[in-house]
């Protein structure tokens, strides 16, 4: 005899406190580097966390949690950059408001960051994800939905461009 009511498993509820603590600062840095405005970056991070909370049950685990959350943040930033409001507003860079970096790839000189920000978006993106978010090439490929070989080539070209631009720099 079958029961009248079948129990459906409860949707996965993310541990948002852990997610915010673990990824908050690095997502804020990533969003700031995309949007070049600390207030827009804060909004983008909040929107990212809302989307993570709402869709955590759909996270299949095909990629790492960090990769999945990073992809959401990138999409939120791209949506903001495409918005009509953003196209009409002139944004002033506020590098002093950028949160302090964490980890081994902290920015030691503003010149490096300025040169990274001056790269074309497809090159800037891979540099930011590889060096500032500490993602592997395979994770970047998943986050950007591009083949690993494409990501490797973009990373190589971005490094070459930075090397040319930073010749004679004190950390050269």
Image: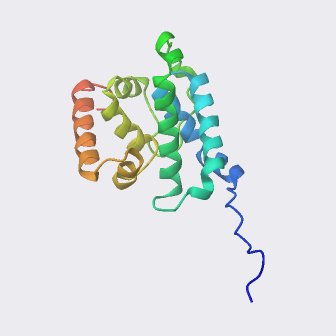
Residue 169 appears anywhere in the view: yes
Q: How many marks?
A: 0
The image position of residue 104, as x and y in percent, is 46, 46
Q: Residue at x 59, y 40 (%)?
A: 48
Residue 33 appears anywhere in the view: no
- Foreground: 94 or 68? 68
Q: Residue at x 60, y 36 (%)?
A: 45
Which quadrant: the N terminus? Answer: bottom right
Q: Quadrant of residue 100?
A: top right
Q: Is residue 115 left or right of residue 168?
A: right
Which quadrant: the C terminus? Answer: top left
Residue situated furthest bottom in the rendering: 1
Q: Residue at x 26, y 40 (%)?
A: 154
Q: Is residue 147 left or right of residue 15?
A: left
- Foreground: 57 or 95? 57
The image position of residue 161, as x and y in percent, is 23, 30
51 lies above or below 89: below
The image position of residue 170, as x and y in percent, is 33, 27
Q: Residue at x 57, y 57 (%)?
A: 58
Q: Quadrant of residue 165?
A: top left
């Amino acid at each position: 005899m079958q029961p009248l009511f079948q129990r459906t498993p409860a949707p996965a509820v993310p541990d948002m406190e852990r997610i915010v603590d673990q990824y908050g600062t690095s997502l804020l840095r990533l969003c700031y580097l995309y949007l070049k405005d600390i207030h827009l970056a804060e909004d983008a991070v909040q929107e990212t966390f809302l989307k993570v909370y709402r869709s955590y049950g759909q996270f299949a685990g095909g990629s790492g949690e960090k990769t999945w959350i990073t992809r959401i943040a990138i999409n939120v930033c791209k949506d903001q950059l495409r918005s009509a409001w953003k196209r009409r507003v002139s944004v002033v860079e506020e590098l002093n408001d950028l949160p302090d970096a964490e980890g081994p790839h902290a920015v030691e000189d503003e010149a490096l960051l300025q040169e990274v920000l001056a790269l074309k978006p497809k090159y800037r993106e891979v540099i930011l994800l590889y060096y500032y978010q500490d993602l592997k090439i395979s994770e970047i490929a998943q986050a950007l939905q591009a083949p690993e070989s494409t990501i490797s080539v973009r990373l190589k070209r971005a490094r070459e461009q930075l090397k040319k631009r930073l010749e004679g720099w004190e950390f050269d």
